Image (cartoon, helix red, strand yellow):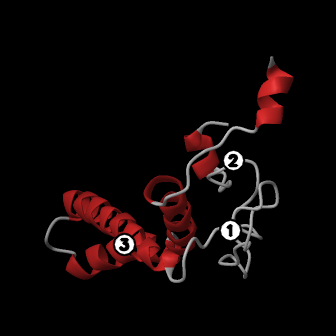
Amino acid sequence: MTKIQAVINHKCPRCRKGDIFKTSAYSMKYADIFDRCSNCNLRYEVEPGFFYAAMYVSYVFIIAELVTTGVIAFFFLGESYLWLTIGLVITPAILLSRVNFRYSRTILLHFLGPIKYRVDKEENQADS
């Protein structure tokens, strides 16, 4: 599994096999994260407060969504429908909040954290 596939599927950054989240994004418990990987026993919260940094990643997502929908809404509606434009700009940020939350944590683990991908020795021997 490639790194991009692991991020899209919310898999462990070390082994790319174990799940990070316990439930789907559409569940009421969408934020529940496993303490450790079920495959390689990696502890996901590397240090206390590690996931606070995910707020910055989520902030980038929200700004990108707001700017994109704002430009599109302004292009189609112009200046005359200001309140409709504001409503249209805020709606995607609200609807995508769960997705932003989950992907910000996953991206933090995969790209911004100290965890590196490790290929299992047994897997290499089986492939050869």
Residue 43 tag number: 1
Q: Quadrant of residue 78?
A: bottom left
Residue 56 tag number: 3
Question: Judging from the image, what secondary structure is the residue with disc 1 in?
Answer: loop
Identify which amino acid the numbered label 3 is placed on: Tyr
Please name whichever residue, 125 or 59, is drawn nearer the observer in this view of the structure: 125
Please name whichever residue, 23 or 68, is drawn nearer the observer in this view of the structure: 23
Residue at image point 44% right, 69% down: 92
Question: Judging from the image, what secondary structure is the residue with disc 2 in?
Answer: loop
In contact (CB < 8 Å): disc 3 and disc 2: no
Mark positioned earlier in the residue sequence (1 or 3)? 1
Identify which amino acid the numbered label 2 is placed on: Arg
Q: Which residue is mark 2?
A: 16
Residue 6 tag number: none
Question: Judging from the image, what secondary structure is the residue with disc 3 in?
Answer: helix
Residue at image point 55% right, 56% down: 115
Q: Is residue 68 left or right of residue 117?
A: left
Percent across and percent down for residue 4 are 55, 42
Within 10 angstroms of label 3, few (less than 14), some, or many (20 or more) residues? few
Q: CA distance from mark 1 to mark 3?
A: 21 Å
Q: Quadrant of residue 21?
A: bottom right
